[in-house]
Image: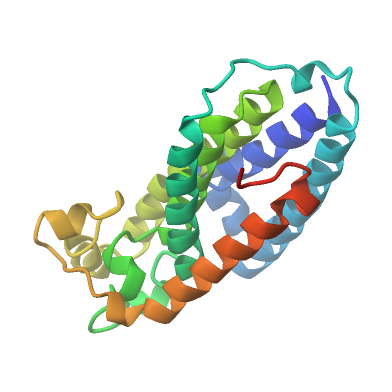
Amino acid sequence: MSGFTLALAAFVLLHIGVSATGLRALVVKRIGEGPYRGLFSLASLALLVWLIVAYGAMRRDPADPLNTHFWSPPETLRYATYVFVFLGFVLGVSGLLTPGPTTAGFESALKKAEPAKGVLRITRHPFLWGVALWAAGHLLINGERFAVMLFGALGFMALMGTRSIDRKRQARDPEHWARFAAVTSNVPFAAIFQGRNSLRIGEFWWRAFAAMIAFAAVGYFHGALIGVPAFR
């Protein structure tokens, strides 16, 4: 098994096998919430560094079987990729700039008079859905074996994370969570389409603008950073 495969498996296992299961509660009970979050963050960072280094080594080896194509996407899918990745940036960056009840350390926001504002009206997990859309967009246009593994794993991990966070927040504060969940949705725009909330772009317009700048910057430097131009 290659270093990239091991690093990716370890990264996903940490976030799904530990954070999203009952094992998390056992560890927190033994060492406390604060130490757990600190250790989890350090472990996540270490595994991310390992994943990046292993990815670079794998990509530099043309003989690595992970660089062969699992399938050959048609070029026309590139336009769908732009849409998915753009929406992913808007949700992801706006979510990072909008700490809410589903963000670690901001659970007390559930008790606010109006806990769902800005991009949280679209989905209560904007960052994770941003990652999922970004991953889906890259899956559409990248057919290499490593790409299917990487983007498939990250997208799956993000979507599983939304369900895990919902369960943990509901168990911790069922009364305030019920009030928050009544006006929000996991799936983007579902609460708005169902009439349980409304889209108010004015509440997060500058965050969306920052996301557009980030999208343009990453797209412009994609060739230098990744080795493949984003726009052709």
Looking at the image, which residue is at 44% across and 62% down? 90
Image quarter where the C terminus lies is top right
Q: Is residue 57 left or right of residue 134?
A: right
Q: Is residue 9 left or right of residue 104?
A: right
Residue 117, compared with residue 21, is above or below; it is below
- Total residue callouts: 0
Q: Is residue 152 visible?
A: no
Looking at the image, which residue is at 38% across and 70% down? 101
Q: Nearer the viewer, residue 159 or 81?
A: 81
Q: Position of residue 187 (x, y in %)?
A: 29, 49
Image quarter where the N terminus lies is top right
Q: Position of residue 44 (x, y in %)?
A: 71, 52
Q: Position of residue 17 (x, y in %)?
A: 58, 37
Q: Position of residue 55 (x, y in %)?
A: 81, 37
Residue 131, compared with residue 11, is above or below; it is below
Structure colour scheme: rainbow
Residue situated furthest front in the rendering: 232
Residue 137, compared with residue 218, is above or below; it is above
Q: Is residue 200 visible?
A: yes
Q: Nearer the viewer, residue 79 or 96?
A: 79
Q: Nearer the viewer, residue 18 or 65?
A: 65
Residue situated furthest left in the rendering: 195
Looking at the image, which residue is at 59% across and 57% down? 28
Q: Nearer the viewer, residue 167 or 172?
A: 167
